Image: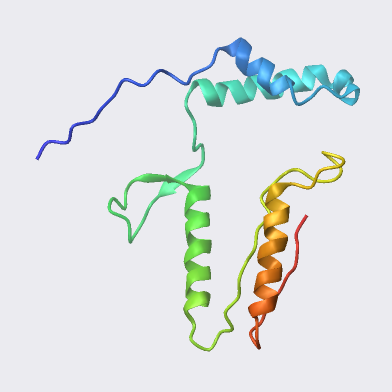
């Protein structure tokens, strides 16, 4: 059976000028003023990677367990996959205490948005409280990472 690959979405590529504008938009603090030559060099290097579509500049062969073991797969993806596989093995150990990981994925904080707590953090706290109420003898670890 032939696969019908549908194409036609507009390009997501941006111009060199737009790339430069977006990169510099995060560097508006006056502390960056004396570093303009270095920033220009970094942006040039980043543009080279973007314009040559190097999404995964560090690759290695996918290896055993993949449909195409000779495929050049992103090294960071392989590392993430290995970490997930190891976590799954630990999770599946019958004698291991089951745990719940709550993640507050919001970048908003009292320091970045005074006067407003992020909805994600509020939901995190609701889930934490619900788990505490239901823990009844199981282990609950409510560590937070900044």
Q: Is 25 on the left or on the right of 55, as rendered?
A: right
Q: Is residue 140 visible?
A: no
Image quadrant assignment for residue 98: bottom right
Q: Is 15 on the left or on the right of 70, as rendered?
A: right
Q: Is residue 90 above or below residue 94?
A: above
Q: Is 117 on the left or on the right of 23, as rendered?
A: right
What residue lies at 42% left-to-right and 18% top-to-bottom?
11
Q: Is residue 65 above or below residue 139?
A: above
What residue lies at 53% left-to-right and 49% top-to-bottom?
76
Q: Which color scheme does this rendered protein use? A: rainbow
Image quadrant assignment for residue 116: top right
What residue lies at 87% left-to-right and 19% top-to-bottom?
33
Counting from the top left corner in percent of width and height, residue 82 is at 49, 61
The quarter of the image holding the N terminus is: top left
What residue lies at 48% left-to-right and 74% top-to-bottom?
89
Q: Is residue 33 above or below residue 115?
A: above
Counting from the top left corner in percent of width and height, residue 101 is at 62, 66
């Amino acid at each position: 059976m032939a696969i019908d690959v549908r194409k036609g979405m507009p390009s997501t590529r941006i111009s060199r000028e737009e790339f430069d504008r977006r990169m510099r938009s995060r560097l508006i603090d006056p502390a960056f003023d004396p570093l303009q030559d270095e920033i220009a060099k970094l942006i040039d290097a980043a543009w080279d990677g973007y314009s040559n579509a190097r999404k995964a500049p560090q690759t290695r062969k996918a290896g055993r367990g993949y449909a195409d073991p000779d495929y050049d797969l992103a090294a960071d993806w392989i590392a993430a996959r290995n970490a997930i596989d190891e976590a799954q093995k630990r999770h599946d150990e019958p004698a291991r205490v089951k745990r719940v990981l709550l993640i507050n994925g919001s970048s908003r904080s009292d320091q970045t948005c005074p006067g407003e707590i992020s909805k994600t953090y509020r939901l995190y706290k609701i889930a934490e409280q619900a788990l505490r109420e239901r823990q009844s003898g199981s282990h609950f670890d409510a560590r937070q990472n900044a």
